[in-house]
Amino acid sequence: MARVVTNTIRTKLETCEALGRLGVATVHEAQGRTGLLATRLRPIQDGARIGGNALTCEVAPGDNWMIHVVLEQAKPGDILVVTPTSPCDDGYFGDLLATSAMARGVRGLVIDAGVRDVADLRQMGFPVWSKCVSAQGTVKETPANVQVPIMCAGTLVNPGDVIVADDDGVCVVANDNADEVLEKALKREAAEEEKRGRFANGELGLDIYNMRARLQQKGLTYE
Amino acid sequence: MARVVTNTIRTKLETCEALGRLGVATVHEAQGRTGLLATRLRPIQDGARIGGNALTCEVAPGDNWMIHVVLEQAKPGDILVVTPTSPCDDGYFGDLLATSAMARGVRGLVIDAGVRDVADLRQMGFPVWSKCVSAQGTVKETPANVQVPIMCAGTLVNPGDVIVADDDGVCVVANDNADEVLEKALKREAAEEEKRGRFANGELGLDIYNMRARLQQKGLTYE
Amino acid sequence: MARVVTNTIRTKLETCEALGRLGVATVHEAQGRTGLLATRLRPIQDGARIGGNALTCEVAPGDNWMIHVVLEQAKPGDILVVTPTSPCDDGYFGDLLATSAMARGVRGLVIDAGVRDVADLRQMGFPVWSKCVSAQGTVKETPANVQVPIMCAGTLVNPGDVIVADDDGVCVVANDNADEVLEKALKREAAEEEKRGRFANGELGLDIYNMRARLQQKGLTYE
Amino acid sequence: MARVVTNTIRTKLETCEALGRLGVATVHEAQGRTGLLATRLRPIQDGARIGGNALTCEVAPGDNWMIHVVLEQAKPGDILVVTPTSPCDDGYFGDLLATSAMARGVRGLVIDAGVRDVADLRQMGFPVWSKCVSAQGTVKETPANVQVPIMCAGTLVNPGDVIVADDDGVCVVANDNADEVLEKALKREAAEEEKRGRFANGELGLDIYNMRARLQQKGLTYE
Amino acid sequence: MARVVTNTIRTKLETCEALGRLGVATVHEAQGRTGLLATRLRPIQDGARIGGNALTCEVAPGDNWMIHVVLEQAKPGDILVVTPTSPCDDGYFGDLLATSAMARGVRGLVIDAGVRDVADLRQMGFPVWSKCVSAQGTVKETPANVQVPIMCAGTLVNPGDVIVADDDGVCVVANDNADEVLEKALKREAAEEEKRGRFANGELGLDIYNMRARLQQKGLTYE
Amino acid sequence: MARVVTNTIRTKLETCEALGRLGVATVHEAQGRTGLLATRLRPIQDGARIGGNALTCEVAPGDNWMIHVVLEQAKPGDILVVTPTSPCDDGYFGDLLATSAMARGVRGLVIDAGVRDVADLRQMGFPVWSKCVSAQGTVKETPANVQVPIMCAGTLVNPGDVIVADDDGVCVVANDNADEVLEKALKREAAEEEKRGRFANGELGLDIYNMRARLQQKGLTYE
């Protein structure tokens, strides 16, 4: 009873890319500290920072069949988001699938499971955020759902939501909030830029944020 | 009642090296998805890829005495495989032992425990796959077995089996299967090379592997 | 009832720096294999090696308020040591706090919790040893103690103790032992240097350390 | 910007109770193997089996304030479902809150965090499924959302969804699927009852489910 | 290419049962502290203590098909030992399979994965040692090997080896060592019985085992 | 250079017992939410609740020799607290040592490592809080310190501090705070008793603790 949904919405790529440039920490703050995927997802490379549309894919444990199915649904600017239907550390994705994904315009992979051929993936410049690295192969026996809402690393991801991923992890922004979150994130970044200069000059957060009175009121004492 | 076995077999070095060049993911597939060590073993460096003969060594928890013993048994092209007799995260191996191992022709270390001096080990170019990094020192009080079959990270390793290790992890090939696995791995690599070109041209796995009919038969539907 | 202690002692910076140059493994050995923080603290960068005075800071779970408070107490050469009052993986520290810390002369951060903006932290050259990376933001609601003795990653750290941190992890040396430990560590390093040459020439630890008789007495046999 | 939603729907209690009697494994199967909360949630008691309406509550890490808020929203037959906004193991709930919850008709607690006073909770007969047991106390400083959709142990829970919990763990059934799932679960139970007798007589699953031909076709051989 | 081996040896049941009565700790010591399965395998019940022949079964991740296959190979006195070909926490085994296993004379289950229906399993008196409890269902798509040597929880188990399991965990004794280990274990138990009386009278291990001189020689001092 | 300190102080037994009766959660609260040992220490039995003097013992990893040494230092009412010098899961303690400990008046064991013979320990009524259960045996080769301040499960324990342990875990109270903490804990218990009645009558914490105004001020809204 598995299904592939083909008529999914997508967020404008320029919005995705603008959110990607701002990065996970800023975007996560801008949407009220929500949308973060669990910290067990770590980049296999340093320094990648991307934004794109979620292309969602369930897989059975130990079975990567659906990754072949989902790639047919890919559009340029998508980020593939894969979640096993029960926890699994196998190596679902390697250099051949990365070659296919890049040929279809996919910008990267977020997977709550393992990947392999990581030396090749790094060399190809295909960024990956995964739960682990494992050479353990998978079978192609059990269908699962493609381009449906999924839970990935403890967070809900809908097809066409914006995925932002960098060295801090992975964050998802709902499709219908993307513009509002972008606006807030840009404001936040500007505010931080101003504060960065003051911090660099040795000013303290205690003064920049006027914290002293409230700390005293909460009972903090100095000896 | 610990013992050192001195008359162990070894696999031809050119076979070891050919398997090493193919890498863990390919070799693991070529031998029917067996022989992988647990994914908790991770490289302390990026980009190393080696093949060699397993030089096996048990150690007591918190005790690295036997590593001195096993190095006398080393031959050029060996890869040292160390397993504690009960789980332990201590730092069993550092730059002095690495200096000794390199002087004896050992190509690298696989250890289901901790190592230390990792900055030095990286600089020396001595590759290590370990469970963790820990500066915790060890004692020299309790003998254990050397060059006997051991369980390392959940997998059986015999002296003279081939160890293949790269950024994907560690795989072992039994001595008497090594030539057969090498042959299969070379075929697999050639087949992948051909497919890589098709994937790069945008062809889908669905078509390359003729998956559509079987997916339909298993009940996959498109909406 | 939280408090900030302002009259804390510090160790001479040249002692801190000399210990820092020797590194975690050597210092940990020199003080009798004590003082190591749990191995869950890992560097977010490769190759940093620092020594400095512990600037200690408790934080409530999910609350980084006190980091603003502690930075007012910083002196050049300090290393900030942060511990949550119950285990927490949130991202307590990012590029703004790092800017502030650097402006106050702080050399690095040791935290038994998460950090974020790690790409920026690496680029700024501000070294961090943390339990994890997480973009999860924190609040500023609950005071905690600053510059008091704290438990960090299972080990007692007093303000003004020496923190040594490198790719092997983090070690603490009590303020009143620092000179003695430094002396022992320098001797140890010299002794290792001499042995390194012998190992490099292919001599075995069995002979360098005269282990053969004791191994035989403990029942080790050769087959 | 935290809020309490007061106008939430609930599922009929007889449906909840019927699902509760069937138990987690049967209900989870009946709804297509979905809705299971992560296995880190374990009962603190043996033998409890309950069904009821989800009463949902976010809490800040280390802060149990909202549990007081949510209990005002409780109706008889509710099961309290608590999730921290970032992972936390503190002891959020003890015998006083259990006394309050029981007085309000709450049937049990599901919490992706810690609880305490577990000896009392067992004696009171108030069943709990938690991530851990911890005496670590919490503060009351930071509001969070009450009776909104939450992610608990990796799964989406809406107020008024049906919670089923027993020794196997915790499962959630969406409010608008409850009757359909109940019907399927009852059918499944009846079918299993029939098969149980055949298994008890020594018949094999190979024959009961006609597996032999398909196994042969998949290449299984006997030696 | 999966296979079922039908001509496997078994150990005499009276030997199995005698080892079972002695328990895991005694048997593990008697065979030189080997054969213990990883401590992640825990009993779902208190107080069970069994011995029997290993009936071995590989399963694919998330797929319990082979458990139906292996039960045809069961003989009275067997203990089913199940290992997934890559790590998996799903609930492979519940009350129907337990009914079948009991009808075939199987004494218990050891599984490096999850089980479900644990309330029923306890009530039926079918003892289980598992990695976790999970209601997550499994499919029947992928064959694997039955009655071959397997790695279970880090230890090699051959069909017909003796499995001993109790509240301390699980231990395996090789078929061809069983009589010798039994003899040693009986001697050990007798020796312990004698010492138990002396300990109960307040005598110290320091004196019973003559440890004082050796402690002094190793440098232990009293202040 | 290991040592046994013989002239350690102890807390009055009636204070220990009074704290024991109050239990871990109450005592931990009464001393300002400090002193809790990490939650990885779990009871092997249900329903035990004890208080006594800490009898402290370091052990080398995989080596239980010092437990024999420390038992000579035991006095009636002591609780044995054991910590390995590096993390270890072996089974350090079983029924013989428990027999010895009970004969010397020891009330229970707290150990940041494994124990075995747990069925016997439960039957003997010797309560244990441990990190895990493991039948893995230990050697007697390496001395360590006895009756010195130790770190156990992340917390500092001095000889003669009060250990309180129950189903919620383990808490330590410093010797020189014991009377003050007891007094506060008794007050806390009395205050809770009064509130328990109000909660049982259906009164809400919101009203009992006057939380409504402060919640509103922090921005909580009702929809």
Image (cartoon, coloured by chain):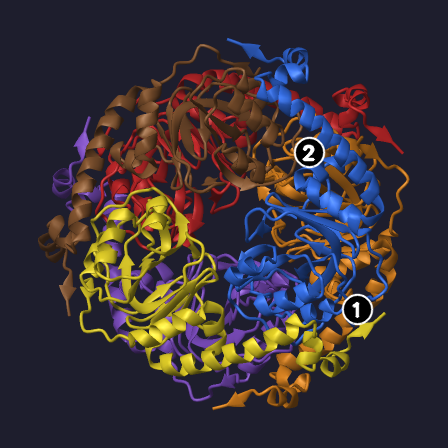
Chain colours: A purple, B orange, C red, D yellow, E blue, F brown
Give the chain of mark 2.
B
In the figure, is residue D164 to the left or right of F18?
Answer: right
Identify the chain of the residue marked 1, using the numbered disc in the image: E
Which residue is found at the position 30% from the left and 27% from the top? F18
Above/below status of B22 relative to F198 = below
Residue A88 position, x and y percent, is 56, 64
Whether A142 is drawn above or below D88: the answer is below
Q: Quadrant of residue D164?
A: bottom left
Instruction: Please tell me how crowded label 1 is: few (under 14), some (14-19), or many (20+) other residues with Cα within 10 Å.
Output: many
Does residue F163 appear left or right of residue D196 in this picture?
left
Q: Residue at x 79, y 48 (%)?
A: E14
Say which amino acid is labelled 2.
Answer: Ala
Q: Position of residue A33 (x, y in %)?
A: 30, 61
Per the rendering, the mark at residue F176 is none
**Residue occupied by mark 2:** B60
Q: Amino acid at mark 1?
A: Val
- Is C201 displayed left or right of F12 in the figure? right
Q: Secondary structure at mark 2?
A: loop
Out of C98 and E174, give the one closest to the viewer: E174
Can I make out residue B140 in this image? no
Residue A197 picture location, percent across and down: 25, 49
Q: Quadrant of residue C10?
A: top left
Numbered disc in front, either 2 or 1? 1
Residue at image position (77%, 75%) is D220
Q: Dots 2 and 1: beta carbons under 8 Å?
A: no
Q: Is residue E107 visible?
A: yes
Give the residue at mark 1.
Answer: E4
Q: Residue furthest left?
A: F213
Q: Which residue is at the front of the view, A110 or C152?
A: C152
The quarter holding residue C206 reads top right
Locate the N terminus of chain B by quadrant: top right
